[in-house]
Amino acid sequence: MAQIFHPSTNTISKVSLFAGVFLLAAFFSSLAAIYRSPYVTQAEVVREQPVQFSHKHHVGDDGIDCRYCHTSVEESAFAGIPPTKTCMNCHSQIWSDSPTLAPVRQSLDAGTPIAWNRVHNLPDFVYFDHSIHVNKGVGCVTCHGRVDRMPLTWQQQSLLMEWCLECHRQPERYVRPRAEVFNMDWQPPGDALALGRKLVREYEIQSPAVLTSCSTCHR
Amino acid sequence: MDDHPTKRDRARAASKGEIFDLPRVRARLGGLRGRQYWRCLEELADNPSFWRHAAREFPSSAPPDAFSRRDFLRLMGASLALAGLGACARRPAEKIVPYVRAPEEIVPGKPLFYATAMPLNGGAIGVLAESHMGRPTKIEGNPAHPSSLGATDIFAQASVLTLYDPDRSQTLSYRGHIRPWSAFVSELAPVLQEKRKKKGQGLRILSETVNSPTLAQQMGALLAAYPGARWHQYEPASRHNGRAGSLLAFGEYVDARYRFDQAQVVLALDADPLGADPGSVRYIRDFARRRRPHDEAAFIRLYAVECSPSNTGAAADHRLPLAPSQIELFARALASRLGVGGMEPQLPPPIERYRDWLEAVARDLKAHAGKSIVMAGERQPATVHALAHAINLALGNSGRTVIYTAPVEARPVDQIESLSALVGDMRAGNVDCLVMLGGNPVYNAPADLNFAEALSKVPLTIHLSLYHNETSYLCQWHIPEAHYLESWSDCRAEDGTVSIIQPLIAPLYGGKTAHEVVAALTGSPNRSSYEIVREYWRARFGAARFETLWERALHDGIVEGSALAPKPVRLVSGFKSRLSSPPPRQREAANPNPEALEIVFAPDPTIGDGRFANNGWLQELPKPLTKLTWENAALVSPATAERLGLKNDLLFSGRTVSVDLVEIAHQGRSVRAPVWIMPGHPDGAITVHLGYGRTRAGRVGTGNGFDAYRLRTTSSLWLGSGVEIGKTGQKHLLASTQTHFTMAGRDLVRAASFAAYRRDPHLALAHQAHEPKQDESLYPGFRYDGYAWGMAIDLSACVGCNACVVACQAENNIPVVGKEQVLRGREMHWLRVDRYYQGDPENPATSFQPVPCMHCENAPCEVVCPVAATAHSAEGLNDMVYNRCVGTRYCSNNCPYKVRRFNFLQYADWETPSLKPLRNPDVTVRSRGVMEKCTYCVQRINHAKIEAQKQGRKVRDGEIQTACQQACPAEAIVFGDINDPGSKVSSMKAEPRNYGILTELNTRPRTTYLARLTHPNPELQSGAKK
């Protein structure tokens, strides 16, 4: 009986068996990559806003402290989005005729709030608290990036759970002195890890076991 | 499919008497030794089908119509594909909308609490309402308020749902057409002008019981402006007999407050101070504090003589079930033994059986003269109230344990007389304008008055109401009422303390308060209730200090020093002769035909007189003793049921009870009602609960249950006789959670007498169960270096009031599932209150046991979850992670305590706009296919921990209160850090009466119980209960 398969089939089947593993691996790793990509996480994607507000100008050029606008960041879970009135504290005096600021003036006149597009959007089953992070020495930059260099704001980090856990597992690598929390330029002097360990002790930051318990963030 | 009973099954069960067979139960009880708890009659009868049903966790989750393998695969494939596609989507973009001008006090993300008060049934409870950025989400008790002391009842907890109820009346209307307030005012103007000319002739106001000082003053002004007008009051569950009893005894209206904290012995004559009576939150607190074993002299003893089993009867050390008419005989016999002259010492025949009981109680009361309380329940006729007053005076209790004050309500009247007079005038054509401030008389007025028919004779009818209800439907003008959380007003609590009611939110639907409507009648239609209430208090406080005192009253939630002063009282002269000839209305109940069935009317334990009928939380709340949800039933004793040939059949799931539908006929009127066989109910009587059978309540309340008001008449307001019951041959399905999640006769509730416990705590509570050692586990243990949260529940304190269940529901966004789902055993309450009976079904001892998640150290649920959606936290919490849960339900199957709840369907309402602001923003709203359970209020734990850490300290003991703990009037639930030996929960767990349930499984539960202690009279111990 004649052979049905040509001898080269052997090679092809071996190669395809071997390649199949790689193909599968490639398939799943590309799925994982897509899941972590800005396409899904929306990291580093600039959001359009009703007013072309520039953190770069206000923080970087003017040096306004974060807390001037985000007033409740030290005491509440929510950092706070400034009311129109806060904008007009300055802009009733400077740039008071700028067309860019027309929506702001209109908001104050009409008493209708400005609806900003949310940049950092956590799922509803995650309960993040700004105040405790700020009080334990997590700098704004650590999560939000160099806001002072963002003309329009984007989300710097992926906000995936694995990213949260990086810090919750080893906070000593991310904390800084409380005094430097709002500092955009702070660099750890000398041995960063030694300083981190000291701060974790000093600030009585909870153990990774507590920090990685589900109910710390999910409830 | 095997648990669907076939017709043959049922027939066989019935023919064998398998379901419930009284003689067999008695025989079985006779053979038992020690305490044996049971939960329903089927269990007591050791009915085999009961155990078959009880053994299954989700018996009805098998679909009734099995579908084919192909259909199954097709559906599964489609679901998988859709789920996969769904997961690809990005989260939708959201908006952040800040303020234009930020209010001063609000910190975004942090709740604020405002003191206000909830008026109810002529009393009030002071509350702190939690507000999240302007929307009230949760009600807590106001610790400074004497009626609350920080606790609440089910009605206060559920009131926030009523506020957001989408079925509330949303517009003012005239004959069904929408009108603005201005149209009402302008159309009313000529009428009022004419009325002024005629000095108010024909103008009538009908209100519920008024306890608002401001409204009372306004009514005074209105009656001054229209001298011919008259003000009537009617509320179905008001203190009709209480008022009459006070007149009978003292010749004037007085209110009595009872000081359980000062008393040693209490006798409740059909009274329910630990349940349905007004002011019960305070009474429960005072009572429970006296049921702790620390101080022998302080342990209080409670006797209850009652007809319908109540929470008070369940808490009592001795309970005597008596048919309603016999309670007066009992009271008279007791009075003769306690120095109230003029009574026949001879015992009438029906009471003769209970001679020992009566004598023992009389001796005990006498021995504790000055430290005892005798209280009469509202249902008892005025004579019994008067006798109770006379006994308290004779024992020297007055001024010590019984405090008399001027009446709390602004103008006490005999409301039945008041309403009868109004109806008579309406019918005679003497009323041409009737203004109803709240209330729903078309539905709840006594049936013999036929209010609806009389209403049709009134040319102009105006009804102010929260809902467009039965009465609104028959009125021309309907004005939506503002909810108390939307109103400025004031009210007096049971001890007279005044609270200013302040709004948490502007009226959602432009509702008006009674103040504003009365102001409109007196010619100032545009005055706001804010101005009206302030003006009244400006005059009271004095202009000079007004702002200071007003601010303080708003902040504290009480007007300082406004409690009514104790008032000395004396029996009227000729008291005895008055007693022997009570007016006919009271006579009727006391003189029944001994052969006929007596009837008892009672407000429903969860929806009250019907005003809460559209509140899903209260509808689905299992009633304390029957554990029925969503409807009412007529209660009869097992022996009476046997005599009448009535049966309760437990159906396939053990959640569904098929009962007989009967025709109850009374005074020529009849209703069809399902019959519930109630252990502990006296024979020869039937209890019906008011508040159901609504026809225009809303989408939740319309059509549930039967309307007992149709049997209620002016002559038999609470009690009646000569009731006939006819079998219809039909069956009805009731949803009772009574047999849910049964624990199969294990040693779950433990109890001992206080005396035995004092002698030897360990012996008194000895039990046989094997307790494994801590290290008997294959799994490695956990270490808790920081906090270790735990809970202790004192069964001695718990009276089964259910406040914890509703508080949990409000705090944790727990959905309502409806009767059909409860029938399948799918109710979602994270915390349930189990009710156990012990002893003879004719008069069993009753115990309550609240069961939240146990947060086991060796949690059986954790190890079976394939996706680690339930995990152990570093502080010992058994965490539930909704976003990981894929709905295998293995955890629930493996949970021995049956505290896990599964979202079989999309129960949480994500669509209705008005329900969105109700939700607690700190707790996830779960979706379909997700398991959930008690979290120990982890949101509160996290808040407290974060606040403590920011201040660089540890969480203080008592700083975290779980929602159930905070609501509990009895302080039965204590939560805290069990790693801290000084914490309250640690000291409770160190008591000898501390025990865990099902510890033989080595689950090592974090929630433990303190055994119940009772304080029986040694003279009676061999006799009645316990």
Image (spheres, coloured by chain):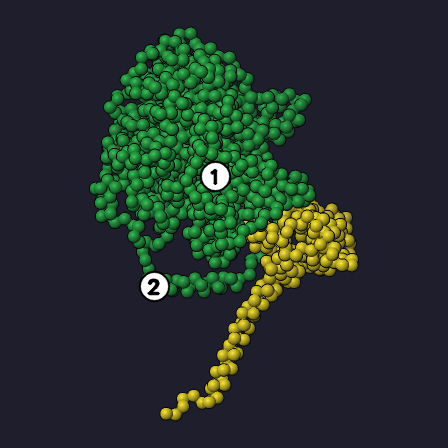
Chain colours: A yellow, B green
The residue that disc 1 covers is B995
Against B489, residue A47 (above or below) is below
Q: Earlier in the sequence, mark 2 or mark 1?
A: 2
Residue B955 position within the rendered picture, expressed as x and y whole percent measured from the top left: 63, 41
The residue that disc 2 covers is B69
Residue, far top: B573
Looking at the figure, which quarter contains the N terminus of chain A?
bottom left
**Residue B752 appearing in the image:** yes
Against B371, residue B507 (above or below) is below
Q: Give the secondary structure at mark 1.
A: strand
In the picture, the disc for residue A216 is none
- Compared across the picture, whether A49 is left or right of B661 comes to right
Residue A92 position within the rendered picture, expressed as x and y whole percent measured from the top left: 74, 48
Q: Give the secondary structure at mark 2.
A: helix
How many C-alpha atoms fall within 10 Å of the one at disc 2: few (<14), some, or many (≥20)? Answer: few
How many C-alpha atoms fall within 10 Å of the one at disc 1: few (<14), some, or many (≥20)? Answer: many
Residue closer to the observer: B253 or B219: B253
For disc 2, the chain is: B
- At label 2, the amino acid type is Arg
